[in-house]
Image (cartoon, rainbow, N blue to C red):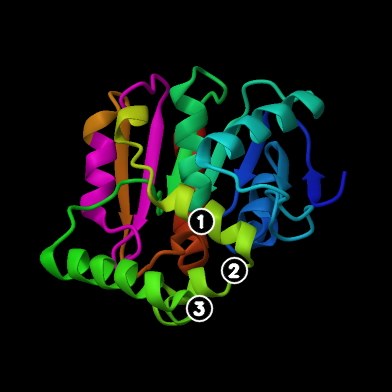
Amino acid sequence: MTGVVQYGRGKDLIFLHGYLSSKESFYPQIEYFSKFFRVTAFDFPGFGEAEPLKTAFSVGDYADWTEHFLKEMKIEKPLVIAHSFGGRVAVKCLSRGDLFERAVLCGCAGIIPKRGFRYKMRVGTYRFVKKIAPRYAEQKFGSAEYRSLPPVMKESYKKIVNEDLRKDAEKIRVPVLFINGEKDTETPLSSIRVYEKAIADSRVKVLRSAGHFAHLDNPLAFNLAAEEFFR
């Protein structure tokens, strides 16, 4: 299977990468944790070395794919480390049962903040412009991340970012550690506190001077916190 790496021996630990990223984003964690666990990192469909998407995937579709992947690899009840979008997939998987034994979620996305007046105005303007000049609307509105995507990935992106996962979080019954960068503006601490409140057995660790990629900004502190939680 392409887009998969596996190292080490022992208890299984898997990695779920962020959006527009790949398994390589966990290099410091793969190198560190392969000393203690059998680590498996893979590329989600549409990213890295994986096959392109043929249809637009939702968070649920990525969760389905992950469950199927684990069955194919004969990986049962692994530990999991996930980042950003990968955290969305982990939350969706965990809401369905005990697929993972424990989870460390870094910069976990999936909580939609309350939208202000300016946001609603921009959405209204986009919808109006799209009716009369769709190509211009696609070029000028939305994030740079969204504009860089091919058509099928754009449809998938919209499904993903418009789903709020707080109800899924309330169904989680396994221990979860949220690790967040102090300077993370993509998934601010206020969103992580929503998750913490929703999940009965959860805790939050904030890494000072780290941003959205806290596992790369301060890999030593991240790895030690995750190792302590797993052990």
Q: Which region is colored magenta?
A: 170-196
Q: Secondary structure at mark 3?
A: helix
Residue 157: which disc? 1
Write the residue at 73% across / 41% down: 40
Residue 135: which disc? 3
Q: CA distance from mark 3 to mark 1?
A: 18 Å
Q: How many C-alpha atoms fall within 10 Å of the one at disc 2: few (<14), some, or many (≥20)?
A: some
Looking at the picture, how far across and down is residue 192, in whole percent?
Answer: 28, 47
Which residue occupies the extreme right position in the image?
Answer: 1
Q: Would you say residue 63 is visible in this rendering?
A: yes
Kindly check if marks 1 and 2 are in contact, taking CB atoms under 8 A apart as contact. Answer: yes
Residue 209: which disc? none
Q: CA distance from mark 2 to mark 3?
A: 14 Å
Residue labelled with disc 2: 149
Residue type marked 3: Arg
Q: Nearer the viewer, mark 2 or mark 3?
A: 3
In screen coordinates, is 42 left or right of 114? right
Looking at the picture, how far across and down is residue 173, in whole percent?
Answer: 39, 19
Looking at the picture, how far across and down is residue 224, in whole percent?
Answer: 48, 49
Q: Does label 1 or label 2 sit earlier along the sequence?
A: 2
Looking at the picture, how far across and down is residue 3, in whole percent?
Answer: 80, 52
- 74 up-or-down from 29: above or below: above
Q: CA distance from mark 1 to mark 2?
A: 9 Å
